[in-house]
Amino acid sequence: MRRFPEPISNLVATFARLPGVGPKTALRYVYYLLKQPKADLDVMARALVQLGERIRVCSVCFTYTEQEVCDICQDPKRNRAQICVVEESRDISTIESTNVYTGLYHVLGGNLNPIEGMIPDTIRIRELKEKLELDPTITEIILALSPTSHGEATMLYLSKHIQPLGRSLTRLARGLPVGATLEFADEVTLGDAMKGRKRV
C-alpha cells in the first residue's frame, strides 16, 4: 500500500472516522482539500475549532446550543405541558420544520442497543424521569423515535417507566408517505396505515 506524507495520512484517518466514510472516500476528500486555496482551508479549520469551543449541550433538553439553555427552552411561547422525546439533536430541526409542534424537547442521545453499549444508563432516560417527577405541569410526552427495532424497544422501555407517573404518553403516527405506492409498502407500514386511517 502506498505511503502518504503524515499530514495526509492523519487527515485521511480523521475523515474515515465519520459515519459512512471509508478510507477511499476519505482520501478523495483530502485530495479535494489539497486543491483548495489555503485561505479556504483556514476558514474550515477555524469553523472546526469553533465547533469544539463554542457549542455545548443545553442543560434542560440536551440539544446543541451556544448558551447554557437553548433558544427553544428559553422561548416563553412554547407549550411547557408537552415534551417531545427524540433520539438526537438533529431530529429537533426536522420536527421544527413542520411548524406544527410548539412544545419542548428532550434529547435521549440514542436508542437502547445493548450490543453497542447503549443501555438505559448511557442514554438520558433517568434525566427524563427526573424532569417529569419534578414538574407536574408536564401533561403529555410524545415519543418521536425512529420505528426501527431499537427505536421500538426504547419506546417500550420508556412507556413502562413513564406510564406509572400518570402522564399522557403518545407516539408519532405511522403509515404511508405521500407519493408512495401500495405495491412497495411493507406489511407493518401498510398495517399501521390501515389502523390509523381517517375519515375523508
Image (cartoon, rainbow, N blue to C red):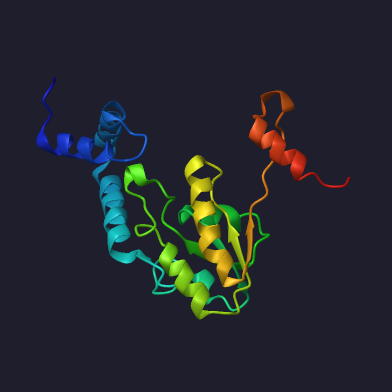
Vertical position of residue 149 compared to residue 122: above or below: above
Question: Could you say where residue 25 lies in the image, as x and y percent from the top left?
Answer: 31, 29
Q: Quadrant of the C terminus?
A: top right
Say which of 169 and 9 sits in front: 169
Observer-nearest of 70 and 32: 70
Q: Is residue 195 left or right of residue 38?
A: right
Decide which of 32, 79 is in the foreground and name it.
79
Where 145 falls versus 103 (above or below)?
above
The quarter of the picture where residue 30 lies is top left
* Residue 64 falls in image quadrant: bottom left
Q: Nearer the viewer, residue 39 or 178?
A: 178
x and y, in percent, of residue 170 in the image: 64, 59
Q: Position of residue 27 (x, y in %)?
A: 25, 30
Q: Residue at x 55, y 59 (%)?
A: 159
Residue reaching furthest to the right: 200
Q: Residue at x 39, y 57 (%)?
A: 120
Q: Residue at x 71, y 23 (%)?
A: 183
User: Is 62 located above or below residue 7 in the figure?
Assistant: below
47 on left or right of 156: left
Quadrant in the picture for the N terminus: top left
Residue with the most extreme top position: 1
Task: Where is residue 31? Give x, y as percent.
Answer: 26, 31
Q: Is residue 196 above or below residue 135?
A: above
Residue 64 visible? The answer is no
Marker count (numbered): 0
Q: Is residue 58 left or right of residue 42?
A: right
Left or right: 62, with 10 as reference point: right
Q: Quadrant of residue 12?
A: top left
Q: Please indicate, yes or no, whether residue 145 appears anywhere in the rendered image.
A: yes
